[in-house]
Image (cartoon, grey):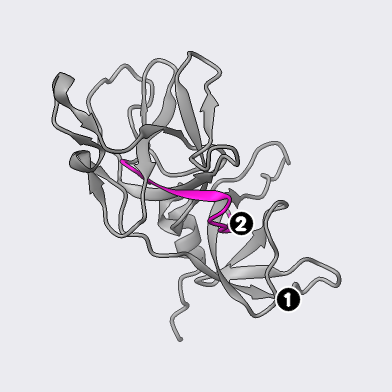
Amino acid sequence: MTYGIKHVPLMATVKANRRPGGKPVAFIDGQLCFFAKDSAIPAIGETVEVMITRPMHPMDAENRFYDFDRIVGLEIQVVDPAKHVLIAIDGFTMFGSGCSVTASGCETNGRRPLNRGDIQLGTGHSAVKLRDNFTITPGRTRIRHYGEKCDGNRGWVDGVPTNVYVDRDPGTGLAQRRARVAGDRVTVRATGLTRIEDLECAEVIQQRNKPRMAA
């Protein structure tokens, strides 16, 4: 089992908003981004590490549902080590009758991927736990996931390891735990993604921002 990847900070350059009086915006590889309400707003021209908190999709022609085949922009938040914790995960998968989407993860410094030996030494009753690992839920991120589609197929499907950011509990200094609505399992909710390619709509973004070939 592999958890996480080597962390490469997601950098965004802050630009002035074309709309008079509008908040500054940012760009990641040509993709327009808007700062979340609770994010710090850096100075125009500054380049900072950010996380993707969610994709922003337009409504359909009837203004009833989101059109996931189009993208308005990405909502981002400036990464603050005092408020956020980097977590290595084994990848989101969908399993069970409730079709819950979860991953398993643990805190990481991002220098390299982790494995079972980084979490637990030995097996059985003599096992020694080296670090906490917990269940991660996707929150609002719309992160890509893998697995069954609630059709009764229980075949095992591996997720794709990556890193996510979660909120830091101001009381403990650790990843903020949350009690699930169903059951008594404790989970940690993803706050932001570290890569565009981890989004469900990654292909839509890449296609939109593909450089146009000269005629």
Q: Is residue 137 above or below residue 118?
A: above
* Left or right: where 125 falls relative to 66: left
- Please check the rendered image and state whether residue 120 is part of the magenta-colored stretch, yes or no: no
Q: What amino acid is at disc 1?
A: Ala
Name of the residue lying farthest toward the bottom:
215
Q: What amino acid is at disc 2?
A: Gln
Q: Position of residue 13 (x, y in %)?
A: 59, 74
Task: Tell me the tag on residue 16.
Answer: 1
How crowded pointer 1 is (Cα within 10 Å; few <14, some 14-19, many 20+) is rated as: some
Task: Tell me the tag on residue 77.
Answer: 2
- Secondary structure found at label 2: strand
Mark 1 vs 2, N-terminal side: 1
Name of the residue lying farthest toward the right:
21
Q: Which residues are magenta?
A: 71-90
State the count of labels.
2
Mark 1 touches mark 2? (CB < 8 Å): no
Q: Is residue 45 above or below residue 210?
A: below
Closer to the camera in the image, 9 or 92: 9
Residue 1 seen in the current view: no
